[in-house]
Image (cartoon, rainbow, N blue to C red):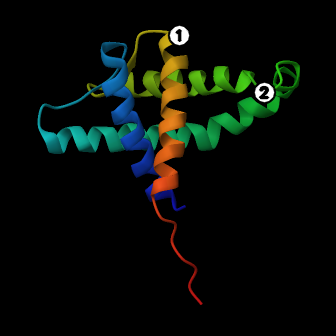
Amino acid sequence: MSFFVRILVNAVAIWLTTLLLGDHFEVVSESTTGGRVVVFLAVALVFGLVNAVVKPVLKFFSFPLYILTLGLFTLVVNALMVLLTAWITEQTDWGLRVDGFGWALVGALVVSVLSMIISLVVPERSERR
């Protein structure tokens, strides 16, 4: 799946998560529809970059915790990636706002599940011969 399709999938997953979790997990944006779409895409881009750059480093250094918890530490790492995305986008007037670690944990879980489901629905590009 290409990077741009992954960003679209994450944007839709984040949008659906904001609908499900309400005020505890929200994206602050302009009131126009076009402005909201751009902000969701920007948040998804930041989220994708955080997951591509920071998450592998964090996973490497926390490898013993993954082993010790039989992989459940993945939930904590995903919540930290959501909190980092929220912190980065809080520096602007728009972006992701999360009420705390608990809501980040729930939001990360919902975004992950929705992203997986949407990725299954989106057809992959066929190989060119």
The amino acid type, in three-letter code, at marker 1 is Gly
Q: Position of residue 28 (x, y in %)?
A: 26, 25
Instruction: Name the kind of residue labelled 2 in the image.
Output: Gly
The C terminus is located in which quarter?
bottom right
Q: Residue visible at 31% across and 18% down?
A: 22
Asked if residue 63 is positioned above or below residue 120 in the image, the reply reads: above
* 78 sits left or right of 56 in the view: left
Res. 91 visible in picture: no
Q: Position of residue 51 (x, y in %)?
A: 59, 39
User: Seen from this angle, which residue lies furthest bottom?
Assistant: 129
Residue at x-position 38% and y-position 42% = 11
Rendered image quadrant of residue 40: top left
Residue 111 x/y as whole percent: 48, 33
What is the secondary structure assignment of the residue under circle 1? Answer: helix
Q: Residue at x 88, y 23 (%)?
A: 64
Residues 109 and 40: in front is 109
Image quarter of the N terminus:
bottom right
Residue that protrudes farthest toward the left in the picture: 32
- Residue drawn at x 51%, y 19% is 106
Horizontal side of residue 13 vs 126, given as left or right: left
* Residue 17 position by quadrant: top left
Q: Is residue 61 above or below residue 126?
A: above
Mark 2: few, some, or many residues within 10 Å (few <14, many ≥20)? few
Give the residue pinned by disc 2.
71
> Looking at the image, can residue 119 be seen?
yes
Q: Residues within 10 Å of mark 1 (few under 14, many from 20)?
A: few
The residue identified by callout 1 is 102
